[in-house]
Image (tube, rainbow, N blue to C red):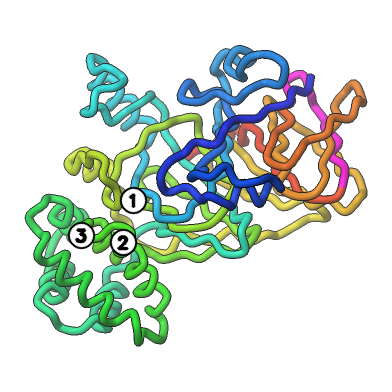
Amino acid sequence: MLLSLSNVPRDYAWGSTTLLADLEGRTPAGGPEAEVWFGDHPGDPADVQGDGTLDAVTGGSLPYLLKLLAAASPLSIQVHPTIEQARAGWARESALADTDPNRNYRDDNHKPELIVALSDRFESLSGLRPIADTLRLLDVLGDSAGVEELASRLRGPGDVLRDTIGWLLSGEAQAVVDDIVGSVHAAAGSASGEWATAIRGVAAISETYPGDPGVVVALLMNHVVLRRGEGVFLRAGLLHAYIAGLGVEIMAASDNVLRGGLTPKRIDVPELLSILDTTTGEVPVLRPVATDAVTEYPVPVADFSLRRIELDGASVVIDVDGPTMVLATAGRVAVSGADGALRDVPVGTVAFATPDEQRLTISGRGEAFVASPGDPASHG
């Protein structure tokens, strides 16, 4: 059976006023439109055309959450727990009300995620840069007291990134933060070479979040620019933040977020540090490697899989296993299942195939993303 899904954009302050409207070919709503959720998560289950919400169909069993994400300004720096950490955190907080400001865990699931760029440029902070590289970046910022203090801490013993991030977020380092941000702005105007994009990116972030210690945390992270169709997978424990752009995001069905800066919301520093993975290195960009019309984005988790379909007028037949979504992102897209009936999928909406469907035919001219449960043999 095929169902038509839609949802109302969530109006988070960082959302774009135009990106989703432009994608869907409609007049902007006048305020920020940040995310559209397609899933059965109780936080915002998708609407089923004609009758109710998706959770009534699935019983809340969908293992993934699919989103359109439109960022005009940076999201908070954040990290998500492993499934073991989520279960333990959920159990510890079982006595807290859902609305309690001290609650960190909204459910008992992990939240690995994949973002694929729909805009020509999608900027993000993804993972922690190798310390030696960050020290070379700091050399470009000069020798102010704040820069020297940060460099000294990064040259110290032990798990220096965990210690340094904890110090930056503790409230005790504000003078250092302000000094470093001043050095970043001074360098941004004339920056060139390998660190120019990162320095200018952090300077721009500080304009949105003046005085926020997360600006200096961002200086420790990889600045990643995705082109249209490119993606990045973010494992549990990996520090990240989306900066600007339009994308398709898919994740395990969870809303567990521990924040690490660039936010007016509460930051639980000890809990953040307890789940933070301080392994350094570049986060690989998943570049499209298409077989005919289909691009795969391989991920090492069983919760979800994502495929991109480019349609040129010829039909594309795909096998599916489990509850599957077809999200239209450009042009004219239609889907048919076992009964052969053709269902139009307007851009920005989803055709949802219930688990009895085993093969879908996708037709038209445009682009669609197919979300399904992942390979049960995968694990993260």
Q: Mark 1–mark 3 contact, CB under 8 Å?
A: no
Tell me if residue 354 is in the magenta stretch.
Answer: yes
Circle 1: element type: loop
Identify the mark at residue 77; answer none if there is no mark. Answer: 1
Q: Amino acid type of disc 2? A: Ala
Identify the mark at residue 13; answer none if there is no mark. Answer: none
Magenta-tinted stretch:
353-364
Residue drawn at x 10%, y 59% is 173
Q: Is residue 158 visible?
A: yes
N-terminal of the pair, mark 2 or mark 1, is 1
Residue 278 screen position, x and y as percent? 29, 54
Among the 4 quarters of the image, the one containing residue 341: top right
- As drawn, is 74 to the left or to the right of 231? left
- As drawn, is 235 to the left or to the right of 361? left
Q: Which residue is mark 3?
A: 211
For marks 1 and 3, give the one nearer the viewer.
3
User: Relative to 81, is 122 above or below?
Assistant: below
Circle 2: element type: helix
Residue 131 screen position, x and y as percent? 27, 69
Q: Residues within 10 Å of mark 1 (few under 14, many from 20)?
A: many
Q: Amino acid type of disc 3? A: Gly
Count up the numbered dots.
Answer: 3
